[in-house]
Image (spheres, rainbow, N blue to C red):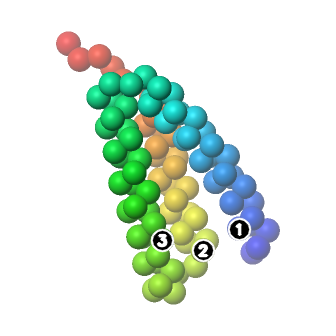
Amino acid sequence: MWWKFYSDIAAANLEAQRVVALRLMKLAGGGPAAQKEAQKMVSEKVTASLEATKTLARGGSPQTVLKHYRVIMRANARRLATPKRSRR
């Protein structure tokens, strides 16, 4: 059980690094898209922290919190890696 948890933590670290890199590229582009991403990033961190606290306070496991974070990180990576189509 612990080996799986540590493996999941290592995988989450790699996923987080990818999301950070993608976000830095977005922020480096500047403009309204960068501003929106910065606001999303901050509000997402606050929300995630509150959700994790609530999960643990209600008797949830660290594994449950990690699993939830990984879902969010994968969604962010997909969103940030997908090029936006221009509107016509």
Q: Residue furthest left?
A: 88
Q: Quadrant of residue 80?
A: top left
Q: Residue furthest top?
A: 88
Q: Quadrant of the C terminus?
A: top left
Label 1, on which residue? 5
> Which residue type does callout 1 highlight?
Phe
Secondary-structure class at tag 1:
helix
Secondary-structure class at tag 3:
helix
Q: How far apart are the alpha carbons under marks 3 and 2?
A: 9 Å
Q: Is residue 61 above or below residue 22?
A: below
Label 2, on which residue? 62
**x, y percent for residue 50:** 41, 70
**x, y percent for residue 74:** 52, 47
Return the disc, 3 or 2, that comes first in the chain's sequence. 3
**x, y percent for residue 73:** 52, 49
Q: Residue at x 33, y 25 (%)?
A: 31
Q: Residue at x 71, y 68 (%)?
A: 5
Q: Tag on residue 52?
A: 3
Q: Are marks 2 and 1 in contact (CB under 8 Å)?
A: yes
Q: How far apart are the alpha carbons under marks 1 and 3?
A: 16 Å
> Which residue type does callout 2 highlight?
Pro
Q: Is residue 16 above or below residue 36?
A: below
Q: Is residue 8 above or below residue 13?
A: below
Callout 1 crowding tier (Cα within 10 Å): few <14, some 14–19, many ≥20: some
For residue 4, side relative to residue 72 (left or right): right
Callout 2 crowding tier (Cα within 10 Å): few <14, some 14–19, many ≥20: few
